[in-house]
Amino acid sequence: MRIASAKESYATDEALFDSAVQRAWFAVLLLALALFPFTVNQYWAYLACLAAINVISATGLNILTGYTGLVSLGQAAFMGVGAYTVAVLEARLGTPFLLNLLLGGCMAAAVGMVFGIPSLRVKGLYLAISTIAASFILHFVFANWTSVTKGVSGINVPPARLFGIDLDTPFKLYWVIVPLAVLMLLGAANLFRTRVGRAFIAVRDRDISAEVLGIPLLRTKLTSFALSSFYAGVAGGLWAYFFRVVTPESFPLLMSIFFLAAIIVGGMGTILGGILGAVFMTLVPELLKLGVGVVSPFWPEAAVVLSPVRTVVFGALIVGFLVFEPQGLTEMWRRTRRFFHLWPFKT
Amino acid sequence: MAGDGTPILEVDALTLAFGGVRALSGVTFPVARGSITSVIGPNGAGKTSLFNSISGFYRPQGSVRFEGQSIERLAPPKRAKLGLARTFQNIALFRGMTVLDNIKLGRHAHMRTGVLDALFYLGRARREEMELRRDVEERIIDFLEIDHIRKAPVGSLPYGLQKRVELARALAMRPKVLMLDEPVAGMNREETEDMARFILDVREEWGVTVLMVEHDMGMVMDISDHVVVLNFGQVIAQGLPRDVQADPQVAAAYLGSGNVDDLRAKLGADARKVA
Ligand SMILES: Nc1ncnc2c1ncn2[C@@H]1O[C@H](COP(=O)(O)OP(=O)(O)O)[C@@H](O)[C@H]1O
Ligand SMILES: [Mg+2]
């Protein structure tokens, strides 16, 4: 067994993908992601980009809420900070695209850290409420700091430019957004192989004994807020380049709830959970819309009749997850994998 | 084998009240370097409160000196970093994590990997994690004979093993003083003997000073160098195990009578049970 030989192969044992099979699957996945845009139209490239942006932000929230146990309803607002930073830099200064994204992430991290300070004193629902305050305060700033944000009319963002190419279609942006999402996911996964990630989990599970182990609570919580907001900021920056206009209404509280729902549906405290949850939440409404489209040639009133039903179905799916699979999609995935692992020898 | 030289830990006039309850009043005792010092006393005597005061959760009056330095103003993580490690009466492991991750957590304060290192898992992060893994495997997991459960989630383990994992985690903290709150409570005789052996070995091989709270008199009398008896938050006796046994006040606290022979008889019975 692997355990018996562990001493000779700690490095292998600690690796992100600890078996050849896993590495092979990861390679297949990367290949699929690389081929995907060539096989679909702009609409699907658009959806893929949107899903990838949401995956980045959901993963950030998962670091904070799923792994560190700090419930936040500020994720969209922190995305807004990233988006505005990028918009201002791009529109006013014309600094390079990737630098803008980085600065957007850093700005969001700084702001997120400030709004994370109450987390030393309050937890759970109370912390959630205090992050809602962040959401309102930031909305106020976006709407009223007109000299920078241009108020309610918002900022138009020129297309991202990379190597002299304007990234002005989802197809072109795909080649930046998806690789960035993959890198940031790998970063998040790496985090939990080290002391930094372990400390997050320790703070979530038992903050008292975390302190006895030498883990300072405030510092750890603020680090988690900063990281999570950094992810939000980069996602927000990509969002700005993707939709090309940033207004105070672009990042409503509802969007923060969307991310919270995504990690709950996907599975809190797992990297896979952030991915599955965000993809699910982004695509299912579209798939339902598509379903309506399919039947409408045969049933002309379908759009009128089914549109409200669509929203209800989406809501019901989320509730269904909460009730029947509290561990989220990740757990369903694990069960499926276990099944195929053993099949056909056992079931 | 008593330790010698200046005490590594000095508890001086600690007084702590919860509302009207005086959990500790004027508690003073030394912990000699390299010794096994035990704190005993009936339930509610203030033993856990004493531990919480030393590790920094409660802010009592009085002072605690660690290697000559006053630490009563330091927050718990700072005290941990200086070399004060502890286990809890009701195991405080992270139940969802594996044994290995729980143990690794103990080293947190001695590592330097920052967020950036961690995200890229290059250089320092990789080096530190590999070093940690090797050290945990070779010095702690082997030593405590928990090789077979390293990948198991802690929540799935029987109580005795969980206690052992908690000891392992405390050892990963590179402790100078190891504080054990009831390390063998709820264990059967075999597990108790194992734990007693581990405690002796820790002192012997790691040169760690042990301060423990324990109800199992047999074990306390067998392995301690110095015994401190608490009753209603006060130190009513301290000294060598045999002197404490011979103290009428201790007999009174435990048995309600001042008859030392009764206490000896009771302790003798306990000791035989362990030996
Ligand atoms: N957090 C607390 N709040 C109020 N009273 C406490 C608290 N902790 C301990 N006490 C009281 O202090 C006294 C000492 O308790 P404790 O230190 O747990 O004793 P021991 O560990 O010796 O059994 C008891 O009377 C207990 O009820
Ligand atoms: Mg106690």
Image (cartoon, coloured by chain):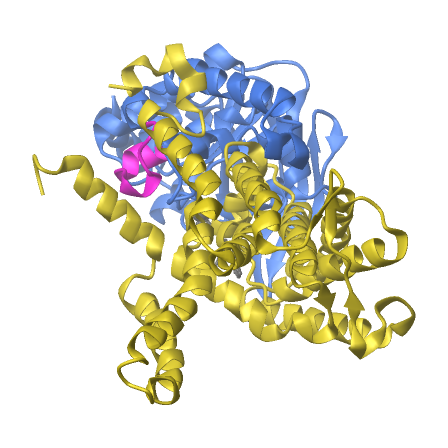
Which residues are drawn in magenta?
A: B150-163
Question: Which residue appears farthest toward the front when viewing the image?
Answer: A297
Q: Residue at x 59, y 63 (%)?
A: A72
* Front-lying residue, B42 or A1: A1
Residue B60 in view in this figure: no
Q: Residue at x 58, y 66 (%)?
A: B20
Q: Is residue B126 above or below residue B181?
A: above
Q: Which chain is blue?
A: B
* Front-lying residue, A120 or A304: A304
Q: Residue at x 40, y 46 (%)?
A: B90
Quadrant of residue B272 in the image?
top left
Q: Is residue B155 magenta?
A: yes
* Front-lying residue, A106 or A175: A175
Q: Is residue B231 left or right of residue A167?
A: left
Q: Is residue A87 left or right of residue A123?
A: right
Q: Is residue A341 above or below residue A79?
A: above
Residue A55 in view in this figure: yes
Q: Which chain is yellow?
A: A
Question: Quadrant location of the N terminus of chain A?
Answer: top left
Q: Is residue B255 above or below residue B177?
A: below
Q: Is residue A29 above or below residue B68?
A: below
Number of marks in picture: 0
Question: Quadrant location of the C terminus of chain A?
Answer: top left
- Percent from the top left, x then y, of residue A293? 36, 75
- Percent from the top left, x then y, of residue B50? 56, 44
- Percent from the top left, x then y, of residue B153? 33, 38
Q: Is residue A74 left or right of residue A257?
A: right
- Percent from the top left, x then y, of residue B266? 27, 35
